Amino acid sequence: MNLTKLQVLLISACLLLLFILYFVGERKSTTPKNTTEEQTAPLTMSANTGNAGAASALKTQLDMPALATKLKDKITQNAADSITYWENQMQTQAGNNLTKTNALQQIAQLWEKEGYFEMSAYFRRQLARTDSTQNNWLAAANALADAFQLAADSTMRMFLIENAIDAYQKTLQFDTTQLDVKVNIANCYFDAYANNPQMVMNGVMMLRGVTAIDSTFAPAQLSLGRMAIVSGQYDKAVVRLQTVIRKDPTNAEAFYYLGEAYAALGQKEKAKEAFENCKKLVKNPNFAAELDLYIQRL
C-alpha cells in the first residue's frame, strides 16, 4: 500500500529537520529554561508581526541586547567574559568603526561557537549595518536564514526571517544580477509564509524570473521542485529535480526531494534509489538511520 500524501509530508518533515541539523549544526535554545514569564519577556515584548505581505518592513521587534545579557548565564564563563570584553571595546571606542566592526565579528563568532545561532546572526546583521558591504550583508542574510530554520519560538522565527529577507534585499542593491540571492529570498517566502498565497506567489515569480535567465540554474530548479511537491505536482517535481541532478550530481538535497516525489507517485524502487544516493552524499549516521526506516516503509 502506498504512503498517503500526509504520511509522506510528516515523515519527510522529520527527515528534513535532521538534514538541516547536519548542515547547520547543533543549536541551543535562546529561551532560558526554568524561567518565569517575566524573564522570558524579550522573546515576546514589543512584537508586532503585522501583515505577512510586508516581510521586509521588519514588523517584528525583539530586544536582542537584553536577551543576550540573559543568555550569558547559559554559556561558558570564558565566552561570556570575552563577549563582555568586546562589548566594552565598542563602548570605549564608540567613534571607531574599525574597532566596532572587529568587535561585532568577534561577538558573532563567540555566540556561534556556543551554539546560539540566533544571537550570532543578529550580531552579523549589526556588523553589516556598521560596515555596509555586499559580503557582510550576504553573510548576515545567510546566518539569519539558517537560524530561522533552527529556532523554535514563533516570534523569534518571524524576527529572523524578516531580517533575513531585508538583508538579502540589501545584498541585491549592490548587484541585482545575483541569481542565488533571489532564490534565497524566494525560499524565505516559502518557508515563512507558506499559508500566505500572495507571498508564495511572489517567491514563485521570483524563481521563474531566475529560470528565464538561466533555465538550468540548479538552486532555482531545486526550490521549484520542492514547491511542486508541496502542491502535489509530483511529476513536475521529478522533472525539475532531475534537471538539478544533471547539473549537479552531488546535490544531496535534490536526491532527497526526488525520493519524496517518487514515493508520493508510488514508484518505490526509484524512491529507494534516490534516497540511497542521498545517504551516500550526506554521510551522516543519524540521518542515514532515519532514512533507512523511511525506506523500509515504502
Image (cartoon, helix red, strand yellow):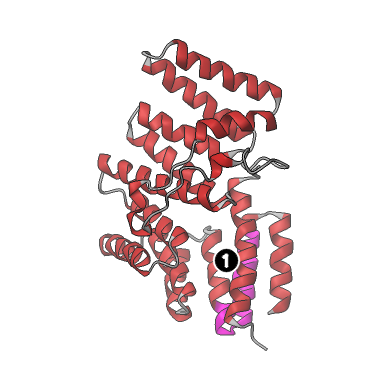
What percent of the width, then of the height, locates residue 221?
40, 65
Magenta stretch encompasses residue 267: yes
Magenta stretch: give its range: 262-280
Residue at 33 percent across and 67 percent down: it is: 198
Asked if residue 1 lies left or right of residue 138, the reply is right
What percent of the width, then of the height, locates residue 129?
36, 31
Asked if residue 93 lies left or right of residue 213, the reply is right
Residue at label 1?
Answer: 256
What percent of the width, then of the height, locates residue 11?
65, 70
Nearer-the-camera pick, 281 or 4? 4
Q: Residue furthest bottom?
A: 1
Mark 1: which amino acid?
Answer: Tyr
Is most of the magenta stretch helix, strand or loop? helix
Asked if residue 37 lies left or right of residue 285, the reply is left
Nearer-the-camera pick, 288 or 132? 132
Look at the numbered disc 1 and give the secondary structure of its residue.
helix
